[in-house]
Amino acid sequence: MDVYLGSKNGAAVGSVPQTLATVATRLEQEQQHWRERLQHDPTQFGEVEVAVHHTFQQLADQVVASLLGDVGHSPALEQASKKSC
Protein backbone atom coordinates (compact mmCIF):
# COMPACT_ATOMS: atom_id res chain seq x y z
CA MET A 1 0.00 0.00 0.00
CA ASP A 2 1.34 3.39 -0.93
CA VAL A 3 0.73 6.03 1.73
CA TYR A 4 0.88 9.75 1.00
CA LEU A 5 0.93 12.76 3.26
CA GLY A 6 -1.99 15.08 2.71
CA SER A 7 -3.33 13.55 -0.51
CA LYS A 8 -2.33 11.36 -3.42
CA ASN A 9 -0.56 14.42 -4.80
CA GLY A 10 1.45 14.71 -1.59
CA ALA A 11 4.79 13.15 -0.89
CA ALA A 12 4.84 9.39 -0.46
CA VAL A 13 6.01 8.38 2.98
CA GLY A 14 9.25 6.49 3.32
CA SER A 15 10.09 3.49 5.42
CA VAL A 16 9.98 3.75 9.19
CA PRO A 17 13.80 4.06 9.49
CA GLN A 18 13.81 6.81 6.83
CA THR A 19 11.00 8.63 8.58
CA LEU A 20 12.68 8.39 11.97
CA ALA A 21 15.88 9.83 10.49
CA THR A 22 13.86 12.68 9.01
CA VAL A 23 12.15 13.23 12.37
CA ALA A 24 15.52 13.44 14.13
CA THR A 25 16.85 15.96 11.62
CA ARG A 26 13.73 18.11 11.82
CA LEU A 27 13.79 18.08 15.62
CA GLU A 28 17.40 19.26 15.65
CA GLN A 29 16.51 22.13 13.31
CA GLU A 30 13.38 23.07 15.22
CA GLN A 31 15.13 22.90 18.57
CA GLN A 32 17.63 25.50 17.40
CA HIS A 33 14.83 27.71 16.08
CA TRP A 34 12.84 27.44 19.33
CA ARG A 35 15.94 28.22 21.39
CA GLU A 36 16.71 31.30 19.29
CA ARG A 37 13.14 32.55 19.64
CA LEU A 38 13.29 32.24 23.43
CA GLN A 39 16.73 33.81 23.67
CA HIS A 40 15.50 36.75 21.60
CA ASP A 41 12.22 37.13 23.49
CA PRO A 42 11.51 34.92 26.52
CA THR A 43 7.91 36.18 26.59
CA GLN A 44 7.27 33.97 23.53
CA PHE A 45 7.42 30.88 25.73
CA GLY A 46 3.69 30.14 25.34
CA GLU A 47 3.88 30.44 21.56
CA VAL A 48 6.99 28.26 21.44
CA GLU A 49 5.27 25.64 23.57
CA VAL A 50 2.37 25.52 21.10
CA ALA A 51 4.84 25.26 18.20
CA VAL A 52 6.63 22.35 19.91
CA HIS A 53 3.35 20.47 20.41
CA HIS A 54 2.30 21.14 16.82
CA THR A 55 5.63 19.90 15.46
CA PHE A 56 5.43 16.69 17.48
CA GLN A 57 1.87 16.07 16.25
CA GLN A 58 3.00 16.44 12.64
CA LEU A 59 5.98 14.16 13.18
CA ALA A 60 3.83 11.56 14.93
CA ASP A 61 1.48 11.57 11.93
CA GLN A 62 4.44 10.90 9.65
CA VAL A 63 5.62 7.97 11.78
CA VAL A 64 2.11 6.49 11.86
CA ALA A 65 1.85 6.86 8.08
CA SER A 66 5.19 5.07 7.68
CA LEU A 67 4.02 2.24 9.91
CA LEU A 68 0.85 1.93 7.87
CA GLY A 69 2.89 1.86 4.67
CA ASP A 70 5.15 -0.85 6.08
CA VAL A 71 2.27 -3.14 7.06
CA GLY A 72 0.07 -2.12 4.14
CA HIS A 73 0.96 -5.17 2.12
CA SER A 74 0.26 -7.64 4.90
CA PRO A 75 -2.53 -10.16 4.31
CA ALA A 76 -4.18 -9.27 7.64
CA LEU A 77 -4.53 -5.60 6.67
CA GLU A 78 -5.78 -6.46 3.22
CA GLN A 79 -8.44 -8.73 4.75
CA ALA A 80 -9.47 -6.07 7.25
CA SER A 81 -9.82 -3.46 4.52
CA LYS A 82 -12.00 -5.82 2.44
CA LYS A 83 -14.32 -6.41 5.42
CA SER A 84 -14.84 -2.68 5.96
CA CYS A 85 -15.94 -2.05 2.36
Image (tube, grey):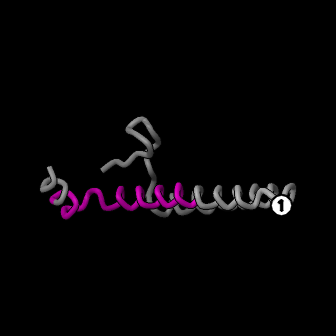
Compare residues 38 and 69 and report the one nearer the observer.
Answer: 38
Identify the residue shown where x is 59% and y is 61%.
53
The furthest residue to the right: 40
Tell me the residue at 59%/56% (across/down).
55
Residue 54: in magenta span: no
Residue 8 position in % (x across, y down): 38, 38
Specify the quadrant of the image occupied by residue 27.
bottom right
Q: Secondary structure at mark 1?
A: helix
Residue 29 can be seen in this image: no
Q: Which residue is located at x 46 percent, y 60 percent? A: 63
The amino acid type of the residue labelled 1 equals Pro
Give the residues in magenta.
Answer: 56-79
The residue where tag 1 is placed is 42
Task: Determine the residue positioned at 82% across, 57% down.
Answer: 36
Give 57 or 44, whichever is nearer the viewer: 44
Quadrant in the rendering for residue 56 = bottom right
